Image: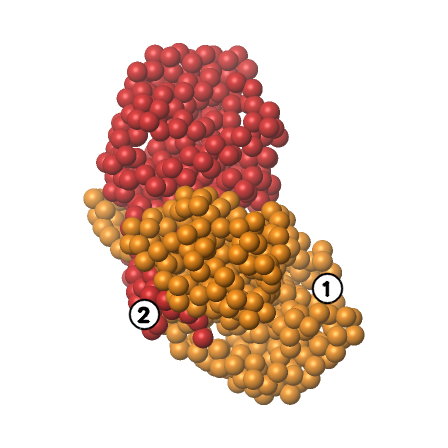
Chain colours: A red, B orange
Amino acid sequence: MKNTTMDLLAIGQKAKESSEILRKLDSQSRNKALLAMAKSLEEQKTVILEKNNQDVNNAREDGMATAMLERLTLDNKRFVSMVAGIRKIAQLPDPLAQTRKQWVNDLGLRISQRSVPLGVIGIIYESRPNVTADASSLCLKAGNAVILRGGKEAIATNIAIVEAIQTGLESVGLSKYCVQLISDPDRQLVTQLMQMNQYVDCLIPRGGAELIQNVVQNATVPVIETGVGNVHIYVHETADFEMAKAIIVNAKTQRPSVCNAVETIVVDEAFANAHLSQIGNALFDANVQILGDEQTRKLLPYSVQASEKDYKTEFLDLVVAVKVVKNYAQAIEHISRYSTGHSEAIITQDYSVAQDFMNDIDSAAVYVNASTRFTDGEVFGFGGEIGISTQKLHARGPMGLEALTTYKYLIEGSGQIRN
Amino acid sequence: MKNTTMDLLAIGQKAKESSEILRKLDSQSRNKALLAMAKSLEEQKTVILEKNNQDVNNAREDGMATAMLERLTLDNKRFVSMVAGIRKIAQLPDPLAQTRKQWVNDLGLRISQRSVPLGVIGIIYESRPNVTADASSLCLKAGNAVILRGGKEAIATNIAIVEAIQTGLESVGLSKYCVQLISDPDRQLVTQLMQMNQYVDCLIPRGGAELIQNVVQNATVPVIETGVGNVHIYVHETADFEMAKAIIVNAKTQRPSVCNAVETIVVDEAFANAHLSQIGNALFDANVQILGDEQTRKLLPYSVQASEKDYKTEFLDLVVAVKVVKNYAQAIEHISRYSTGHSEAIITQDYSVAQDFMNDIDSAAVYVNASTRFTDGEVFGFGGEIGISTQKLHARGPMGLEALTTYKYLIEGSGQIRN
């Protein structure tokens, strides 16, 4: 399955053609396609898991780190959950064919804003093979064709998954080109995908900072930037100690490898003097390494000196930076300087301070007295998630099906002309 | 007023700082600032008109075409209308501080989606000096700082307008850096603006195809692509002749230089045989040059042979291309191939055909029995317009104040952690 430069244009053109058909498909037909995809994946389960095993073995031989291998692995449990995910998406409400707004203007023109698909969506991601099925299903549910570019480590798995999806699509009379995979590892093809404005309406990069920056820097197709979360929790002096401890330990340790895990704790001096040692101990017991400023180091003798760079780092690991501040203003200043605009939380019992924090912090998700781990489409009730946007255009924060749609205006008249 | 590379970073940083203040300003304070801007512009009217006269004279000496000179000119009437526009924007409803949605999830987290400003907006435009005041006012009303880059022909006018605006801002205690102008004509600075992701949240290019493509190709900051309209009107065989004639003449001649003016008329053969000669005569009487295919040329002997390129061209002039088709399917095929996704209309008396057209055409504005000249924020009731988006992300079609906002999620809990 070798793609040349010529082929990528063909992929784009076929995606565009498929999107024209998907755009006009009713909700029932799109859901039927999703169920057929799920069924076909189940039928190909043995092959897919075998291919994944092959990918994992190759990656291990190439010396891939354990955490990465873990992401690459598609075991039985994950496979079942992946397929169940598709069936769940089929049951979600249709994000299309809704009239978002409608009014009649003073000339009697009836103006409607109607939800429609984006068209062709390019997804550029890393080694998690479940993204192949998740992203395809969400895009299809919202009436979009999709061009996938997964990490080369997962290539055999992705080819097998996409073949199963395409078989499913064809079994209900749809074109297999609704879901296509760029399987050639040539990096030049990714650049070409990012600049194929005539065929691609939107790019969603999913992965680490380097992948995302590559897309932002090189794309001419509109991009929804996702992901990088240098997440802060600010513990106000009025915070409830038990609540602060529980939230911090949860936000750091419940799943440290994800973007909504906390990376820096900012603590009011008064709270730190009273309680930081106990919170430090709880983190220490959970095997978290603590990087602290001078004051933290005095209170937590086992902590390591934090550098400027540490406050900028998304560790995605059992490591946390701690910064002790004199007051609210210093906390806001620190967070504003280092935040990537993903998720930040305050823990406080002070009503006014909570309101101020929600106004002052300019992040996609701003929390009061809750773990930052909740920044997630599922938790927000979107039924699925295509990523978490850290930019301000189009969609911000967890993106569900609505983020995969746009709208058009329909203007119905009776011969009106403009004076 | 020479900007160096160093200065542009300073402009960005000051815009960012100003946006932090604007973000927290209540509606009343933003409106007060707008009224102060309007007052200050009135006070500087003589200077501004003088500077504009200077710009126009220089441009005329440099051999600028009449149509361009017309756009550059700021006469008394336009000045009055520009200032009145700012006062009108002050009276519009506040697009901020609205809770778009709010719900409580199954863990008891209260999740709100609240409207907030985009932050810093870069506007890159051509020679119309009124854009300087219009764009600044709309951005400010929505709580954004703005960095302006107008055409070099209007430089003296733009400097005078921005100085007046800044004086107005300072008179109500706001920083003049809320509205800044890149007055150095060095093109390198535009490229730098387009890649200043750390300070600029969004770019809106306004102008011709070349300017817009330059921004799309070179920006790393998210862009809202505006403007280019290769607009079609399809005359179905059931169309009412008088209505068709009135709409076509209006859409072509009422203001031919704008993006919502029609560029190609697609006509069903049956209608063409019966009525095209009369419509052609009406266009001919209005000094419109007609470029037609074989069948058109037979019906309209004064028409000129249309080339493939003509069907792709946004004439922005008293020129129209005509294409005769056998049926609806051929019409949709022609429009889908050549449309830029801006505005298209059908003229028909057939209910089902009207419905089909609204489903089949994938443009920002789709009309039934009305002139395409209505694609306009003012007509749509937005009270103003920052441009007409021809992309699908964020905003599509006429963009009012809402397009200059984004949202953030506020999540209020009582100690919830994730299992």
Residue A338 visible in rendering: no
Q: Amino acid at mark 1?
A: Pro
The answer to whether residue A251 is above or below residue B58 is above
Q: Nearer the viewer, mark 2 or mark 1?
A: 2
Q: How many marks?
A: 2
Badge 2 marks a residue whose secondary structure is: loop
The answer to whether residue B111 is above or below residue A174 is below
Question: Residue B222, how many percent across, how many down?
Answer: 53, 51
Residue drawn at the location 54% of the way across and 42% of the way down: A198
Q: Disc 2 and disc 1: Cα gap in Å?
A: 46 Å
Question: Residue A332, how many percent across, how many down?
Answer: 45, 57
Question: Residue B44, how many percent across, how many down?
Answer: 61, 85
The residue where tag 2 is placed is: A108
Dot 2 and dot 1 within a common chain: no
Residue drawn at the location 51% of the way across and 27% of the way down: A182
Residue drawn at the location 62% of the way across and 79% of the way down: B74
Q: Chain of mark 1?
A: B
Q: Which mark is residue B215?
A: none
The residue where tag 1 is placed is: B185
Badge 1 marks a residue whose secondary structure is: loop
